[in-house]
Structures are given as structure tokens and as C-alpha cells.
Image: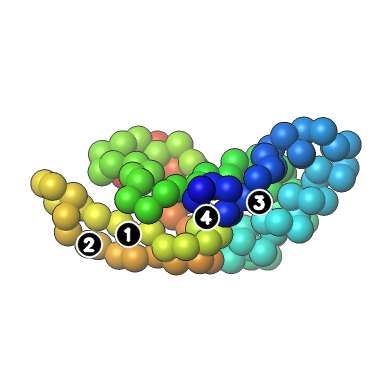
Amino acid sequence: DYFWSLSGGFDLHQVLESIPWSLRVEVCMNLYEDVVRQAPMFANVHRSLIQEIVIRLHPLVALPGTWIFHEGDVGHEMLFVARGTLQILTGDHEDVLLATVSEGSFFGENALFFSPAR
């Protein structure tokens, strides 16, 4: 029910795979360009770089209470929060709240340059 309410019942990836490349790029730009440009490192880069980024994004729907990664995991990607909020927890029982991030936030950017443990 949760995924259905977010997606309207269709698989965006499947739709994008069925349309021509140039149209796919434009759809992804319309969906994700503003989210990506909110990260300072991408705010003023050329449109062609943003196109290369948005075409490679993979939406992740996380149900409330879902772990996206655990402390100590090696990072391989940067994540953008398009909707909702996330809590960053730490501690022996992952019960200490470090921060809450919301729409427009991003994290994991160090994983683009290094593969650090989170």
C-alpha cells in the first residue's frame, strides 16, 4: 500500500526503459535536476554533468523504520532525500539520534571520492 501510494502503481524504471534515450534524459532532468542541484557541489555545474548524474539515479523507497545502511558499512553512493525525513542514528544499539534530514538534503557525498565506512 505504501509503495502504491507513492508510485501511483507504475514502475518508473520500466517506463523509462521503454522510451527513447533523449526523452529519458529529459524526463529524468525534470524529475531530479532540482534535487541534485541542491547539493552545493552540483549547484553551478554544466547541464551535461547533471544529465549524466540524473540518468544514473536509482529511486529508493524506504518504508518507515527501514535501515538504509548501518554504521561501519562502506559507502558506494550519494543519496538525495526527495521526500520524507530520515534519522541518522548511532550508538551500540543505534539508539542515539545524531540528526534528522529532510527533503532537499543529501548525504554520502564522500563515497563519490573515497569508500569510507559510514
Please tell me which residue is depicted at 28% across the width and 41% down the height of the picture: 70
Q: Marks 3 and 1: CB-CB under 8 Å? A: no
Q: Nearer the viewer, residue 90 or 113?
A: 90
Q: SS at mark 4?
A: strand
- The correct choice, above or below, for 106 with respect to 24 in the image is below
Q: Nearer the viewer, mark 4 or mark 3?
A: 3
**Mark 1 or mark 4, which is nearer the start of the sequence?**
4
- What's the distance in space between the residues labelled 3 and 1, CA to CA? 26 Å
Residue 16 at x, y percent in the picture: 76, 39
Q: Residue under label 1, please give it.
A: 87
Figure check: 101 above or below 65: below
Spatial CA span between label 1 and label 2: 7 Å
Determine which residue is flagged by label 3. 8
In the rendered structure, which disc, 2 or 3, sits on the residue that comes first in sequence? 3
18 horizontally vs 34: left or right: right
Locate the C terminus and report the quarter of the image it occupies: top left
Decide if residue 9 is on the left or right side of residue 46.
Answer: left
For the residues bearing labels 2 and 4, Cβ distance under 8 angstroms? no
Could you say which quadrant of the image residue 116 lies in?
A: top left
Q: Amino acid at mark 3?
A: Gly
Q: Which residue is the site of mark 4?
A: 80
Three-letter code for the amino acid on which mark 2 is drawn = Leu
Where is residue 28? Give x, y as percent. Answer: 74, 50
Residue designated by label 2: 97
